[in-house]
Amino acid sequence: MTPRPGPEIVNVPTARPLIACAREVGSECPYCAGEVALGDPIMVCAACGTVHHRNCWRRFERCGAYSCAPSRREVAVAAEPVLAISMEDLDRAVPLPATPWLPVAPVASSTFVPRTADSSGRGRASPLSLAALATALAGVPLLGLALWVGLAGVPLVGAFAGLVAVVLGCVALGGIRDTRRKGLVPAVAGVLLGLADTVGGLLATGWMLEATAGANPHFLDAPPDPAALKALAPELRRAMQANVLLERREALGLAIGSGVILAIDRNEALIVTNRHVVDPHFTSSKALTDPSKLGLLDVKTIGQQSRSGRVVWLAPDGVDLALIRSPCSADGSAAAAAWQKGRSSHVGETVFAIGNPQRLGWTHTQGVISQYRLQDVGGRQLKLIQTQAAINPGNSGGGLYDKDGYLLGINTWTTDKRIGEGISFAIALDSLLDLSPPDVAPPPAEREPLETPAQP
C-alpha cells in the first residue's frame, strides 16, 4: 500500500518594503524592540504582517515574530485553497469605530491592554466634582450676606469662590471624560453655579460702590445742628420740621427716601412720599395693590428717635405716591407742612427743596421753577413741576416749597448727573389731592396766612 504523500512544505521568508505611515507608527520591531516612527524604512512580513526595521530584517533575512519562530516558518500548502489576506486588502481595510470604554490600539501593536473598572476608577465619584459644587454653594450665602448687610468687600469673596468652583468643575469634567468616573451632574452644577456667583459678586460689588460713592460715609449719620435750626426763618424752619427720613431694608441693601408730614393727629403723623420709596416692586409686575402687605419702614422725624411706620395708601393707576402713618411725639420738634390746594406759582419763581440726599438728613437746596409739564399716567393727567433745585438720591418723597414755605409738590425724579444737571421733577400737590387720598384735608388754620410754629 503506497502511503499518501503529505502536503508540500515551503519556506516563506519574504517581506514587503515600505515607508512607515500612521498605521505602522508605534509598532515594536521584534529584533531591536524599538518603536517604529513615522517615515522609517520598514519591512512587513508577508506571512504574519509583523513590522520590522529594514536594517533589522536585512541583518537576519527573516521574520523575528514569535508566530514565525524560529524564523523558519514553514507553511503547509494544502490541496484545498486557503484564505489569504494580501497587503492590498490591508490597505483597503477600515478600522472599526472606537467605543467610549475601549481605546483603539495602534495597528499591529502587541502591547494593548484593555482598561478595567479597577484601573480607570470607573464607578467611583470624582472628588473634584463634589468640591466644585460645595465651593459654588458656599459662594451663595456670602453673596446674600453682603447684599443684606451692605459690605462691599464680601461680594468679591463670593465672586472668588465662584471662580474657584468653575476651575474645579472644569478639571473634574476632564477627569470624568478620561476615566469614566461618576460625578457629571455635580461638576456641571458647580460650573454653572460658580459662574452665577462670579457674575453676581462682581455686579453686587459695582452696585454697592456706586451706591456709596455719592457721599462721604463719615458724614452720613451727622445730625443737623439744633442751633442752626433755631436761627432759620419761620417758613424754612417749618419745612424742616415737616421732613422725615425713611429707610427700608431690601435684598440689595438699604433703601433711603424722604417724606413730608401732612398732618399730626393724636400723636400720629400722616406722611406723603413716593410709592417707589415704600414698594420695591413699584415698576414691575409684582407691584402690590394692598398696602397692608408691605413691610414696616423706619421713620425718623427731626429731633426724635426712629419709629416704625406702616403704609396706609397707595396711589392708583401707577401714580408714584403713597401715604404712611407713624407715631410722632407731641414735643413740638416735628410739625405738619403748610399747604393749600390751588396755590398759585409761576415759572421762574424761587423754590426750595427739603430732603435727605445720600442720607444727609434735613438738607436744603434752592432753585427756581423751570417749567410746568403734564404727564399721562394710567389714564390720568399729572401736573409735574420741573425745577433746577438740586435733587439727589434720597430726596425722593421730600417736599418742594415756594418762597413762603408752602408745599407745592413731592420731589420724584432727577436725571443722571453724568448726562444732565439741573433737571428734576416733582408731582404737584394738587395732583395728589385730585386722587382723594384718605384723611388728607388742609387744616383750617392753613387757609389763612402761615403762622409761625413753636421753635424746637
Image: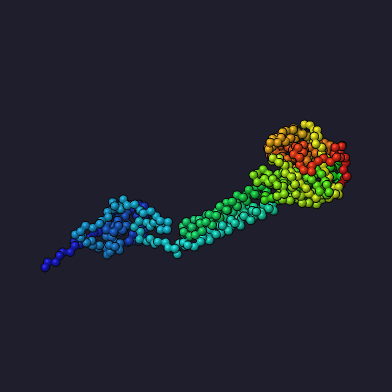
Whether residue 116 is visible here, answered yes or no, is: yes
Relative to 414, residue 217 above or below:
below
Question: Residue 434 placed where, x, y %?
Answer: 76, 37
Which residue is situated farthest in the top direction here?
Answer: 347
Say whether residue 305 is left or right of residue 21: right
Identity of the residue drawn at 80% across and 33% down:
345
Residue 167 at least partly seen: no
Q: Nearer the viewer, residue 304 or 93?
A: 304
Residue 355 percent coordinates (x, y): 77, 43
Residue at 74%, 39% in the rendered image: 435
396 over 348 or under it: above or below: below
Which of the 4 quarters of the picture holds residue 57?
A: bottom left
- The x and y percentages for residue 131 are 56, 59
| Residue 276, quarter of picture | top right
Number of marks in picture: 0
Q: What is the x, y in percent for residue 389?
A: 76, 37
- The residue under the point 39% across, 55% down is 98
Is residue 47 left or right of 140 when viewed as pictured?
left
Viewer-nearest residue: 172 or 302: 302
Residue 131 higher or lower than 426, as above or below: below
In the picture, the quarter occupied by the N terminus is bottom left
Please, which colouring scheme is shown? rainbow
What residue is rendered at 76% in x and 46% in y?
A: 324
Outermost residue toward the bottom in this view:
1
